[in-house]
């Protein structure tokens, strides 16, 4: 821009060789208007000119008398030019060195080729620009605040760099279909990938509780503070959305106070800093963590849209106006929320799904957590032996808790091996509570006092009740922040606070003069709520089932919950498993704490008769609500199968069932499904959920079809399905995180029972190694008819193994290989498999890098095939020569019905070969050639042959 302005002035400062340097006074005159229009900060110039005795106090007083910034700059230029060349050069030197304040002039400085003289270089330049000072302060404070992560261990703090580990981040569409992985955080702001709506300004990050949303924002904050996040953001403002619940209904603040009072306050000239932010909103990055945790009686629907940055309004109006782009339009925003919180599309720029740890991420995190190599190896080996724990460890929060409690797993079972039994999430949280209560107990200096879990919990029953009561009161209203008086009212002592289950948080609203508290994680508040419902003897049946009833309400989550028109709250009928996560976790823990296996533990805390009464209430209600839920599922009739299509809330029902560890309840659920094809697609099921799925599905008496496509299941999840494999005739695991190791498990188990007919592994992370296991399964399992293994990482080596196995199989009906890279070598192997195959009917080798050579081999082999009806060869590199071979094949093969050659390199010449061949073939219904090298004009020549589809 500066270059354009200079060009418009039609003045050149280039000097001929040997000429004397240009006058700096003349330079300032030539570019006077450019400087006046681009210098926004005069104080830094004045400060440095005074510091080096170029300006007197009187000079500064003259400048500040002028009302506008432009007039001040003009006066400074007049004074500087009047004081000579050295002062004029020093003026330019300040502009060059204080880049933060005068960044818009840097291209101009480069253009004029300014290099300070030795004399001027010796003069100090100090950046006193209020905006620059504020940015420095902001980076310092955010860097300090993000350096540590608070743990559950008695306010123990851990360095972020020692605990943060990458997890699976995936860009998704509005309908949550994958658009690719995110490997670098800068990619979140790169519009070349994953852009859904160019008018939206918010990057929406979502995932389940404990999946790592908050720590991801902390990592982004830390990188920005260290200048290691190059996204063009000069300002960073972070907000935890639940804190907006602290503001009273009648409170009103302006945008300036929201930014500065509740983040970092400028030491100098807040007005100028705020004015700068308003002028350059694209240099601002906001993070809003936990949008689904806002709870307020305030009704936003009665308020007009807010556009004025100076007007004082309720803070929630400011929040919504920022997200909508009505305030600071052009600023960058990251918004997090739990899965199931749908935000209207018009504010979203990108959607990012956090999926937790993959198996490789878990190994990296284990290496980070356990520094000792021997201990690390032991942990990895034992986790590998216990897929149930491994599955829980895919959720970063639960992984951290398990690792912190690892020694207690050892001591609890008096073994160096982890127990070969089911470990529920309730077990993990009970162990975590025990570990940190144990730390508070005084022990002898000479001996270690070992107490049982029951003894530890009994010794701190008062503490557990107090924490539980406060958690319950908050959960009743979906409230997650507590004032000092609320803490005191339930008799939580200072010693209780030191246990580390609560942490202090920055006060908002009128609470600044006292501490504000929250549980360290939402799931911990849910656990203490459930614990209170179990050990408080006076809890009625209605109160015990309170949160099941909240989930089954026909109203929104809370009648008084924050009403934002574009925040869509999912509605449901009489369904206790509706997506409402903080209630769901409470219900899950309640099922776990009232399970039969916990009766012995809790008889030390509450009368056995009370536990028995509560168990009966829960199981009765659970049975009835489960019956109601299962009746409402979508059902359809398929050949040999009765299918039910479940919703994501079904997974919560399974989780609750699993926590009970009650085989009779699991058997009842299986019976009441009245189906043998369970479709669990798009249910956001994690590997740990496979334990719950198996818990119910292994009770099925007959062969079963299980569809788990489009979830978040990795190898550990596959291992959790072991109890089901003896029943599984159909297993679909497409679009998950399965690797070669998971495929090996599938081969080893499915080959034992010889009943599987359909194996779906499309779009996973399978290489040639995994392809070989699938090939062995095809060879050994005569029942296998359908294999979908496209969009993996299979090359010609794996392709040849699969082709050879298919050649030997007499039962294979369909093979789907779309989106691999088998190339011509793999194509030749498949050609041999096709030759005279007795049954193979549907074949897809689309998008596999097959050229003319491979295409000709396939075409020649198909002259000797009478079984294939549909052949997909879309998105390869087949040309007219290949088309001619397929034309010759069509003259011979009268069984093929559909041939797809879409998006290849066939021209009108190749189309003509195919069209001529169809005159001798009446069996084929279509040859699809869309997306080839043929124009609409050329396609008109083939209009008479309707089976040739060019457009």
Image (cartoon, grey):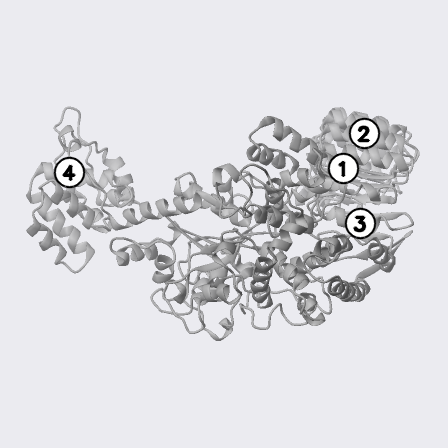
Is 92 placed left or right of 585 in the picture? left
Assess whether mark 1 and mark 2 are in contact (beta carbons under 8 angstroms). Answer: yes
**Marks 3/4: CA–CA distance:** 77 Å
Q: Is residue 937 left or right of residue 247?
A: right
Horizontal side, residue 438 vs residue 159: left or right: right
Estimate the spatial distance between the alpha carbons at disc 1 and disc 4, rounded to whole Å: 69 Å
Q: Which residue is mark 2?
A: 802
SS state under label 1: loop
Decide if residue 103 is on the left or right side of residue 705: left
Badge 3 element: helix
Kindly check if marks 2 and 4 are in contact, taking CB atoms under 8 A apart as contact: no
The residue lying toward the viewer, choosing from 10 and 308, is: 308
Report the residue marked by disc 4.
Answer: 90
**Residue assigned mark 1:** 789
Q: Is residue 635 above or below residue 429?
A: below
Query: In the rendered structure, which disc, 3 or 1, sits on the residue that comes first in sequence?
Result: 3
Of mark 2 and mark 4, the one earlier in the sequence is 4
């Amino acid at each position: 821009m500066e270059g354009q302005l200079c060009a418009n002035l039609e003045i050149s400062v280039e000097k001929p060789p040997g000429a004397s340097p240009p006058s700096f006074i003349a330079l300032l005159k030539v570019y006077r208007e450019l400087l006046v229009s681009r210098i926004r900060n005069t104080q830094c110039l004045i400060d440095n000119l005074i510091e080096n005795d170029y300006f007197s106090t009187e000079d500064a007083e003259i400048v500040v008398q002028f009302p506008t910034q432009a007039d001040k700059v003009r006066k400074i230029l007049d004074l500087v030019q009047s004081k000579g060349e050295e002062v004029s050069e020093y003026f330019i030197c300040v502009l060059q060195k204080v880049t933060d304040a005068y960044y818009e002039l840097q291209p101009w400085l480069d253009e004029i080729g300014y290099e300070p003289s030795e004399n001027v270089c010796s003069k100090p330049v100090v950046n006193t620009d209020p905006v620059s000072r504020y940015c420095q302060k902001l980076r310092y404070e955010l860097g300090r605040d993000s350096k540590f992560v608070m743990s559950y261990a008695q306010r123990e703090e851990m360095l972020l760099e020692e605990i943060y580990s990458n997890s699976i981040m995936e860009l998704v569409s509005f309908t949550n279909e994958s658009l690719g992985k995110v490997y670098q955080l800068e990619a979140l702001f790169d519009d070349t990938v994953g852009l859904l709506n160019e008018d939206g300004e918010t990057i929406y990050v979502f995932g389940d509780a404990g999946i790592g949303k908050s720590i991801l924002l902390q990592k982004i904050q830390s990188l920005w503070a260290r200048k290691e996040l190059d996204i063009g953001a000069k300002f960073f403002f972070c907000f935890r959305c639940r804190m907006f619940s602290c503001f009273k209904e009648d409170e009103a603040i302006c945008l300036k106070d929201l930014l500065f009072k509740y983040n970092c306050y400028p030491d100098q000239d807040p007005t100028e800093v705020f004015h700068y932010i308003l002028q350059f909103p694209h240099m601002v990055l906001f993070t809003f963590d936990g949008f689904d945790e806002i709870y307020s009686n305030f009704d936003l629907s009665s308020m007009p849209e807010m556009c004025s940055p100076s007007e004082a309004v309720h803070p929630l109006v400011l929040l919504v106006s920022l997200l909508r782009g009505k305030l600071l339009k052009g600023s960058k925003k990251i918004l997090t929320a739990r899965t199931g919180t749908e935000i209207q599309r018009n504010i979203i720029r990108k959607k990012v799904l956090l999926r937790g740890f993959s198996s490789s991420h878990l190994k990296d995190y284990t290496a980070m957590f356990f520094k000792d190599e021997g201990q690390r190896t032991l942990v990895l080996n034992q986790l590998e032996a216990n897929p149930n724990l491994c599955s829980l460890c895919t959720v970063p929060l639960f992984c951290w808790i398990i690792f912190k409690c690892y020694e207690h797993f050892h001591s609890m079972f008096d073994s160096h091996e982890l127990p070969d039994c089911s470990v529920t999430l309730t077990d993990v949280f009970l162990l975590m509570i025990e570990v940190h209560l144990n730390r508070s107990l005084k022990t002898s200096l000479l001996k270690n006092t070992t107490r049982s879990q029951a003894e530890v919990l009994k010794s701190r029953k008062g503490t557990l009740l107090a924490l539980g009561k406060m958690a319950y009161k908050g959960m009743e209203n979906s409230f997650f922040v507590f004032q000092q008086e609320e803490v005191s009212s339930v008799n939580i002592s200072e010693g209780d606070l030191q246990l580390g289950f609560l942490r202090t948080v920055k006060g908002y609203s009128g609470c600044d003069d006292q501490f504000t508290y929250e549980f360290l994680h939402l799931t911990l508040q849910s656990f203490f709520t459930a614990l209170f419902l179990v050990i408080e003897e006076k809890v009625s049946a209605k109160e015990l089932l309170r949160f099941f009833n909240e989930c089954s309400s026909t109203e929104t989550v809370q009648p008084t919950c924050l009403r934002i028109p574009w925040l869509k709250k999912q509605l449901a009928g009489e369904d206790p498993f509706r997506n409402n996560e903080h209630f769901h976790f409470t219900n899950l823990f309640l099922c776990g704490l009232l399970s039969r296996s916990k009766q012995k533990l809790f008889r030390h805390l509450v009368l056995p008769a009370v536990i028995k009464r509560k168990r009966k209430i829960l199981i009765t209600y659970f049975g009835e609500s489960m019956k109601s839920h299962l009746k409402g599922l979508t059902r359809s009739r398929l050949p040999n199968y009765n299918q039910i299509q479940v919703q994501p809330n079904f997974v919560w029902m399974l989780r609750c069932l699993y926590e009970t560890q009650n085989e009779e309840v699991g058997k009842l659920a299986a019976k009441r499904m009245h189906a043998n094809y369970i479709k669990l697609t798009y249910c956001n099921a994690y590997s740990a959920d496979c334990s719950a799925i198996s818990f119910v599905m292994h009770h099925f008496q007959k062969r079963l079809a299980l569809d788990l496509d489009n979830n978040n299941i990795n190898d550990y999840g596959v291992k959790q399905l072991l109890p089901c494999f003896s029943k599984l005739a159909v297993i679909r695991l497409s679009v998950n995180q399965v690797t070669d190791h998971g495929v090996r498990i599938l081969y080893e188990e499915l080959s034992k029972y010889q009943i599987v007919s359909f194996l779906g592994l499309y779009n996973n992370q399978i290489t040639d190694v995994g392809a070989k296991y699938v090939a062995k399964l095809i060879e050994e399992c005569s029942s296998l008819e359908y294999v979908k293994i496209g969009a993996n990482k299979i090359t010609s080596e794996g392709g040849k193994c699969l082709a050879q196995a298919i050649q030997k199989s007499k039962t294979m009906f369909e093979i789907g290989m779309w989106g691999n890279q088998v190339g011509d070598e793999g194509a030749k192997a498949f050609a041999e498999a096709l030759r005279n195959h007795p049954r193979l009917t549907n074949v897809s080798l689309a998008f596999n890098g097959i050229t003319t050579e491979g295409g000709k081999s396939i075409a020649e082999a198909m002259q000797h095939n009478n079984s294939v009806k549909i052949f997909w060869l879309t998105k390869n590199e087949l040309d007219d020569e290949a088309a001619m071979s397929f034309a010759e094949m069509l003259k011979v093969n009268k069984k093929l019905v559909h041939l797809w050659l879409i998006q290849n390199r066939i021209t009108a010449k190749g189309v003509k070969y195919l069209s001529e061949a169809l005159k001798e073939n009446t069996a084929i219904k279509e040859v699809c050639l869309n997306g080839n090298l043929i124009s609409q004009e050329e396609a008109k020549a083939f209009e008479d042959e309707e089976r040739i589809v060019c457009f």
